[in-house]
Image (cartoon, coloured by chain):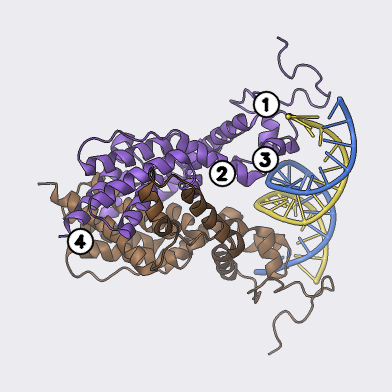
Chain colours: A purple, B brown, C blue, D yellow
DNA sequence: ACCTGAACACCGTTCAAGT
DNA sequence: ACCTGAACACCGTTCAAGT
């Protein structure tokens, strides 16, 4: 019952562990590594996911990580896989278009949990089992609706891309920048628009606030998904 | 008519300049810097855009770059702006929906020229003058068609995101990975799919090739843009 | 105006060695 | 099985100094 890592600590630094905020610095393990990396990416951006940085967060030397993970790429891949682990394949009832919508919704929901690591999802979508399951379902829906292999593939890919881009490109969610300078960037954009001649750029000026911020997050995702589903519907209708 | 930089070269390395492939290593200047950085990103990915790396490409010390550019962020911003410089605002004739399509096409065409730097575009879209012009036009079209400020803003943003994602996510265009390992990654994906039970994943198996490669690039972009335009059309029709 | 030298605080990774 | 020490080749950036 002795608290882990209280014994046998070399007398180097004051403590070495949890000196970063929000870091309880738990037992080192592959899972703990991936979890911490995902958290880090969400809080400070993907660039903050550094072997050395994570090592000090765990109170350990950088090389310790190489026991649990082959190299940084493998860590990144594991993060991508972990994102899809939260994926739930929706139940198969309702209109086929509703089911397509449900698939995109579940994709968006999974990605929203780790906005800082969304870019890691694409390369793993054909490898992660839950993602494979959802892909199979979606492709089946599209194929049954009459789309060709090429069309269904393109539409399914677009579904993932849409979900990714909604999360990544959400205004007000620049994940990699801490509050002080994030506000400065938004300010810079609005300022750049504000100096424009009002007679030449009436619409841009009118939409500046709507473009740089996002009052209702759920309706933002809703309308993004609506656009995709509406596109699929229209393309399907145009096939006759 | 003496060739530039042939005089007064310190006797350090053999030559120091153009030792990287494809590098004529021209006169150092802000424009040359940005051009080279864009090329680098297209050939080897955005990570290859490093101050020190670029410096050696120009045959110069890293600190020399800081005269032409405040820091790396400013270089990245300049790259984003340069992408939009190739943007042509399409002529204003035809159906409003055709004009919306033309706007997306021109966006895609600009982004396709620098696939490695597409991610730098989003933060500059409200700051780059050509992008402002296209945004104004697009927002005007959508507003005139009856969409609200919020709707028009979301749709216009989605247009940019769609263009970005089409270029970024194009199968067979993993920009950051040189040929040897790129083929290996595609192979890994297809292998992962191939080992799946054929009775449970018929569609995924049937679509594996279509998902991992892109035979006809122009039709790929065409159908991606079609989906967006069809979505806008359907959303517009649903407003009555 | 334009560039260098030296220095600092980072980064990923390998390899041999410790327990 | 799990971690460390030392080393290597990178990275962005600052500051004082050169021409």
**Residue under pointer 3:** A51
Asked if marks 4 and 1 touch (Cβ < 8 Å), the reply is no
CB of mark 2 within 8 Å of CB of mark 4?
no
The reply to whether dot 3 and dot 4 touch (C-beta < 8 Å) is no
The answer to whether residue A177 is left or right of residue A105 is right
Tag in front: 2 or 4: 2
Residue at x 30%, y 47% (from the top left corner): A140
Name the secondary structure under disc 2: helix
Residue at 17% x, 59% y: name it: A238
Task: Tell me the mark number nearer the camera, choosing from 1 and 2.
Answer: 2
Residue mark closest to the camera, 1 vs 3? 3
Q: Element type at marker 4?
A: helix
Residue nearest the observer in this picture, A6 or A47: A6
Q: Is the C-beta separation of discs 1 and 2 under 8 Å?
A: no
Is residue B132 found left or right of B31 in the rendered image? left
Q: Chain of mark 1?
A: A
Q: Chain of mark 2?
A: A
Query: Residue A98: image x %, image y %?
Result: 23, 40
Asked if residue B216 is positioned above or below residue D13 in the image, the reply reads below
Q: Which residue is mark 1?
A: A19
Residue A22 position in % (x across, y down): 58, 25
Question: Which of the 4 quarters of the picture holds residue B22?
Answer: bottom right
- Residue under label 4: B97
Q: Secondary structure at mark 1?
A: loop
Share a chain, discs 3 and 4? no
Q: Is residue A91 above or below residue A8?
A: below
Residue name at image x 13 percent, y 51 percent: B237
Q: Are labels 4 and 1 on one chain? A: no
Quick one: label 1 or label 2, which is nearer the N terminus?
1
Q: Residues within 10 Å of mark 4 (few under 14, many from 20)?
A: some
**In front: mark 2 or mark 3?**
2
* Residue at image mark 2: A77
């Amino acid at each position: 019952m002795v608290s882990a890592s209280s014994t046998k600590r070399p007398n180097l630094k004051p403590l070495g562990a949890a000196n970063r905020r929000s870091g309880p610095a738990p037992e080192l393990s592959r899972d703990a590594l991936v979890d911490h990396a995902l958290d880090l990416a969400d809080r400070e951006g993907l660039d903050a996911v550094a072997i050395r940085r994570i090592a000090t967060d765990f109170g350990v030397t950088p090389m310790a990580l190489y026991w649990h993970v082959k190299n940084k790429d493998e860590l990144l891949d594991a993060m991508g896989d972990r994102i899809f682990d939260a994926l739930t394949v929706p139940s198969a009832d309702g209109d086929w278009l509703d089911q397509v919508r449900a698939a995109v919704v579940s994709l968006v929901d999974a990605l929203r949990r780790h906005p800082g690591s969304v870019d890691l999802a694409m390369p793993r979508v054909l490898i992660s089992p839950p993602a494979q399951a959802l892909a199979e379902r979606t492709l089946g829906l599209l194929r049954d609706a009459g789309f060709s292999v090429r069309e269904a593939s393109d539409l399914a890919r677009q579904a993932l891309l849409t979900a990714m881009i909604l999360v990544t490109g959400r205004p007000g969610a620049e994940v990699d920048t801490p509050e002080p300078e994030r506000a400065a960037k938004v300010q810079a954009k609005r300022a750049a628009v504000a100096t424009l001649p009002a007679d030449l750029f009436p619409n841009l000026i009118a939409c500046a606030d709507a473009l740089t911020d996002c009052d209702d997050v759920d309706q933002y995702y809703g309308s993004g998904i609506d656009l995709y589903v509406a596109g699929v519907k229209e393309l399907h209708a145009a096939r006759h």
